[in-house]
Image (cartoon, coloured by chain):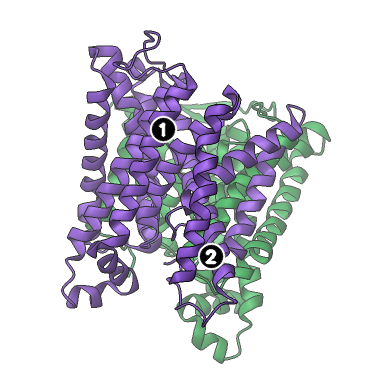
Chain colours: A green, B purple
Amino acid sequence: MDIYLLEAIINGLLLGGVLALLSLGLNLIFGVIDVVWICYAEVVMAAMYAVFWLYAEWHWPLLLACVAAIGFATVLGVLVHVIVIKPILGSAPINQLLATGGLLFFLQSLATLLFGTNFRNLGIRLPVLEFGGIFISFSRLIAFGVALIGAVGLYLFLARTYLGTAIRAIAQDREVMGLMGANERGIYILTSAIGGGLAGLAACLLVLQYDVHPFIGLTFGPITFMVCVLGGLGNMIGGFIAAFVISQIIAVGGYYFPIEAAEVLAFVFFIVMILIRPQGFLGK
Amino acid sequence: MSDARDLRFGLYLPLAAVVIAPFFLSDYFLHLAVQIAIWSLVYTAWALMGRFRLTSLGHGAFLGVGAYVPTLLWNNYGVTPWLGIPIAMALSVALALIVGYPSSRQKVVGHYFALITLALGQVVLLVIVAARDITGGSLGMTPHTVGRSWYALQLPNKAEFYVVALVAWLIGLAAWHFVERGMIRLALEAVAEDEDAAEAAGVDVLREKLKITALSTGLTALGGALYAQYLMYLSPDAMSGVGISLEIVFAAIAGGMYDMLGPTVGAAFTILLTEGLRVLFGTHFVGAANTIYGALLIMFIIFMPRGIVGTAAQLWNRPRGPPAPAAPQPAE
């Protein structure tokens, strides 16, 4: 096989890890609270700025800056739920989706106000590794590894702990669980916190690879929604598979065509798949 | 209904005055008025679908087709926009039907419909960027200028363009009126309530959905074309993609998507607010205006889901007579 094609496939695999992490948070929130956070990528953007600010301006150690950014995103996740979602939990789902869309504008503009529209980066250059002629960026490798660890951690939490079981139970049937005495409100806040935290984790991985600017959310937000819907909204395993399918289409497509054309290919694939199977790969 | 009629009559005269006033004011106000008229058309077009729970987050796709096709035809083949715009509208409708036909057949609704349309908007954005050899990519493009010309629909005189924009706006309102009075409204309201029940009652769901989709997307393309002809500059982010698609949705909701003049009020409100905040903050705080705008949007959706016009009409009707029948709630 062509060595460049192999390189594209491997890079696609690495990209898939980060996409999978992003889709996990969004799917968790949708599965439990039944809300699509259109502003999810903007929460990631905010956390990217947090890492940038703490590391590059305040000269915190990178690891500490990342931990703080994850904490920041966790709090932001809770705030999104308490301030925006909670007052309209009873109204139509599309209104909840649109309210978080308003938040998208708000966060974007606030970032512009605070940081300007310049592209910022950490100024860290991680080495590029070479394996028998194949070049792989070290930052992507880290991102892939951490994303997988995050996914496994979330899986263990949901499968093995008491709270995780409660979250899954609410996702299955919120009315009955309420009657059985599960603390629905607490679970919602916990879910939003975890969703925010996952966004923060993704932000730490993305900020190593990309410059941060107020509109960066628009570049990977739509792809994240696509991954979630393709896997079946709320279905985390489906989203996980879809993340790798989509990233392969983009990576391998990018080998044959210009990168925008590869993304068009991914979006067209998405639209066609949804029209054939609206419930997604693994949706009910 | 006589109260409502009084209200309408009381509104029409001031409205007519406001619509005509820019002709007597400076170019600056004409500039705002042209934008309000064009975006009113686009928001009205969006609300034609939105009011029936067909929440599209991808109308930027049709705006983009409407903006780029006539300009590409003009620049490369010298085709007049008078021909280019209908072609763009037809292509836009075709694109909408290619996606709309299977999604209506598969009964794709709610979140899925919203996210499919979001993807469609992104596809058009990426196609425009990818075809940078002819579209200029992210840098944008300009139509070849020929000075003032009706043939090229290039009217540097803002008063003249305002006439064109007003005609387009009235076309949008006429389309709304046509839908409001027609069987299609009853059919689609039934579909929005309960698709299966409507089908069982004899509504041709697929056909009615496609009709409103075609009307909505065709008019959106018209709005996009006029906006490009007015600005004489096209850029992918301003004409398609997620950002502008969401702006369309928000403005229509802010004004009120269940009333004929709601989207128009939404256009006036958002454009004047943005402009007012821009003047207020100047260039000192880039982003401050939009931050406030974003916060207002969230509050609108939480506290006034029926928008300015819908809420005003409710307040107007409340003290007189029995409460109005339950309004169709915006939807899943």
Quadrant hosting residue B2: bottom left
Return the residue nearer the eye: A215 or B253.
Answer: B253
> Residue at point 31% right, 63% down?
A279
Q: Amino acid at mark 1?
A: Ala
Tell me which chain the residue with mark 1 is part of: B
Q: Is residue A121 left or right of residue A167?
A: right
Q: Which residue is mark 1?
A: B165
Residue B224, given in percent of the width and then of the height, sits at: 38, 33
Quadrant hosting residue A195: bottom right
Q: Amino acid at mark 2?
A: Ala
Q: Which residue is mark 2?
A: B313
Q: Which mark is residue B28?
A: none
Mark-to-mark CA distance, 1 and 2? 27 Å
Circle 1: is it few (<14), some (14-19), or many (20+) Cα within 10 Å?
many
Question: Where does the N terminus of chain B fall, quadrant-wise?
Answer: bottom left
Residue B268, given in percent of the width and then of the height, sits at: 55, 43
Kind of element beneath mark 2: helix
> Residue at point 58% right, 51% down?
A102
Residue farthest toward the top in the current orientation of the protein: B146
> Residue at point 52% right, 44% down?
B267
Q: Are marks 1 and 2 on the same chain?
A: yes
Tell me which chain the residue with mark 2 is part of: B
Return the residue nearer the eye: A96 or A267.
Answer: A96
Residue A92, given in percent of the width and then of the height, sits at: 48, 69
